Amino acid sequence: MKRTLTCIALLALMVVSCKKKDDNEDNTSTPDPYATQKTELKTTYANLAFAVYDDALLTAQDLKDALYAFVDNPNATTHNAAKQAWLDAREVYGQSEIFRFVDGPIDNPSDGPEGLINAWPMDEAYVDYVVGSPNAGIINDPVTYPAINAATIISTNEFGSEENISSGYHAIEFLLWGQDLDASGAGARSYTDYLTVGGTNSNQDRRGQYLKVLGDILVLALQQVRDEWDPNGIGNYRQTFLATESSITLRRMFNSMRVLSGIELAGERIFVAYENSNQEDEHSCFSDNTHRDIYLNALAISNLYKGTYTRVSGTVVSGYSLEDFVAEVNATKNTELLTRFQTTEDLIGLMYTPFDQAIVLPAERPKVLDVVTSLQTEQTVILSIAEEFGITF
Amino acid sequence: MRLLIFSAGFLFLISSCKKNPVIEEFDPATDPAAGSCTVYDQTSYAFSYQVNGLTSNESLQFYVGNSFFNQNWVEAPSSTEARDGLGPLFNAKSCAGCHFRDGRGMPIMNEGLLFRLGTPDNNFSGAISDILFGGQLQDQAISGVPHEGQMTIQYAEITGYYPDGGSYTLRVPTYSIGNQQFGALGSTTRISPRVGQQMIGLGLLEQIPDARLLALADPFDGNGDGISGRVNYVSDLLTQGISIGRFGWKANVPTLYQQVAGAFNGDIGITSSLFLNENHTAGQTACNGLPNGGTPEISDEDLASVVLYSRVLAVPAQRNANTHDVMQGKQLFKQLNCTGCHIPTHVTGSGGNIQALKNVRIHPYTDLLLHDMGGALADGLPNFKASGSEWRTPPLWGLGLIQTVNGHTFLLHDGRARSIEEAILWHGGEAERSKNKFKELSKKEREQVLRFLESL
């Protein structure tokens, strides 16, 4: 008896689901009223991506040149020039991170080079000496790693652990600045670590070679990503992207925005450092440049939303934007998000610098938490706008 | 036309009602893999999102847990005080070393593999370790300390045939330990390799009520279907009593707290309030008297954040659930009685302190029970009630995304299967019947079963 009843109940359920299927068919036959806008958004997205990666490549090439100049002739001037080139390159790269988290050219699992470019946090002892371990790292281990070349470094990057970072901006940062052991300033590595005659610490030649190779790898990796977005490229990712169904690409845009605001920035990059009060947890811990990373990542989110990016040359790249689109659909939410971007930016500006002190000084800590809260709210608004378009995560 | 399909569906339902009254039908579109704890990302980050509905504090603590999960531990003493105390013996420097992007390890050194060690004796009070090496091989050590040895794997290919003439190959592993630096392994000690498992939905599995597992258990195969699910009863270090085991390949760990603390201790060499001793044996004297990273090395607070993290990693939704092949495959999966152990649906209880995990209808495709899987998979290492040939049914949710997240499809406890198909073909013992029925399917039907499993 019970079995018969169950079957009847299931039968009834099937009737319902058959009916529902009809509804779905009706839905899919309705043309998307926003098809044009969504298509235009794809073009803007692709143009912004190309511009920012093209700039990232140009600044990485400058950085590479500066690293070579420094290693070939280590002195305070070339050292400072290399540091400045690194800081300049970061001003661009931070704005590119809105193109992550959707398995695009930067971080798709098959050949996305993100791990070679911007992996963090580093276990610095994996690369070079640290206080208390003068022989630590690949640089000081010529037995295991007789040759310092791109193959060695790429094969050791993230080998055995996500934190075994051997390449990218933060490895370069560590080799330029060294460990940040000083509360009042950044890491204080001396250029003498690179003097092959009369230098400080060991393996100066290997350290110099390592730094040069890091410059090579960075340029190659960014060239690869930039080429995938090149409007003159043939059969590259840009073409695939523009041919992808626009509801899928719209979802990707919102996904990157919510991940970068609520997860990457609010969670992993700021709150963790705040909670642990530990500079090991800050993004650019060697150079004390974390406040810029935070500012630039937040800017990247609003750049994508506003459909605009100002190139290093001063040229402004812009197009039909999510802002334009959302203004058509729900003007209130559009205003709410624009206001939130401004609030987030203002609160980031109020944080104490360097960031490693902002998370430690009792009077300054609440300001860090304010940024976290604002970014969480930003994520909530982004999610609610995405829902307007039937997108859930 | 629609009427015909409908009638066929009805006939099918009648027959399935007879066979398997416990297996509920569900539509993944409205009843997703893990209810409100489901996420829809299909990228390589698919295993790394937190569940929806956490409190603001839980949501933020998740990221603290994430950082302790990902970041390397370093040798003590170090200026990195929160994270020193690595080793002296260890397998990995971080949790993510074996669970890369919260996913699954590979049967390759340094990529998420470890060798469990033990003797075939069973006194039902947990696994019996090797007297010198302990319960697992630590193939790495801090500077100045010898490591225990090197994992060595050799595979021999064997060919098998489907009744329809199609062939397949399986690789049969042989394990040994090279370069044993502390002395020789005990003469009766056996090696049982384990790969790190994906981390998704663990807090939900923890919340399936004990009563549900006991109701599913059929220790003497009372219903005569050839399947005798058994509950493992194991030491609960938190309650100092005996609890039902849920985690680990032999369901030999009762809680995520104990699983996480145990992994910190055994795999990374980090002591906690639950495991106060370093992970070496009395005979490994080179490990004595070394500096440690505090007592314990991970604070209760930091441990709690990693446990929270492990509890609330969300479950990805099924993909392509309503395509023809996947739906056919789902029905075949049930017809073959794979669902006899890979039970699709449970509802979590109302215990615990995370609101988002309570009373959630979930479809993990596991019963969390022990099953004899036959001689070919047996490791000969009993663990509490688990015999040397019993294994816990692993959940299947997220199965098809392992390729996306981790770039491989190595399955089973030791990663010997190179694909879902090979994993099915390794099933024996209580699953022998279902496996043989799978082999008897047409090639097209077998593909449909695989499409279904890849969609999970």
Image (cartoon, rainbow, N blue to C red):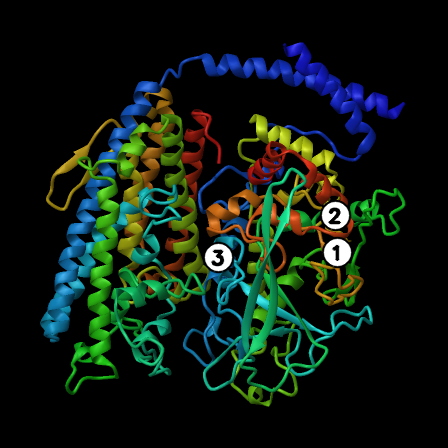
Q: Secondary structure at mark 1?
A: loop
The tag on residue B374 is 1
Q: Return the disc, 2 or 3, that comes first in the chain's sequence.
A: 3
Query: Dot 2 corresponds to which residue?
Result: B431
The verdict on a common chain for dots 2 and 3 is yes
Q: Nearer the viewer, residue B180 or B286?
A: B180
The verdict on a common chain for dots 2 and 1 is yes
Query: Dot 3 corresponds to which residue?
Result: B100
Crowding at mark 2 (Cα within 10 Å: few <14, some 14-19, many 20+): many
Whole-percent x, y for residue B9 in the image: 71, 20
Whole-percent x, y for residue B131 in the image: 70, 82
The tag on residue A219 is none
Q: CA distance from mark 2 to mark 3?
A: 30 Å
Dots 2, 1 in contact, CB < 8 A = yes
The chain ID associated with circle 3 is B
Q: Secondary structure at mark 3?
A: helix
Compared across the picture, whether A372 is left or right of A72 comes to right
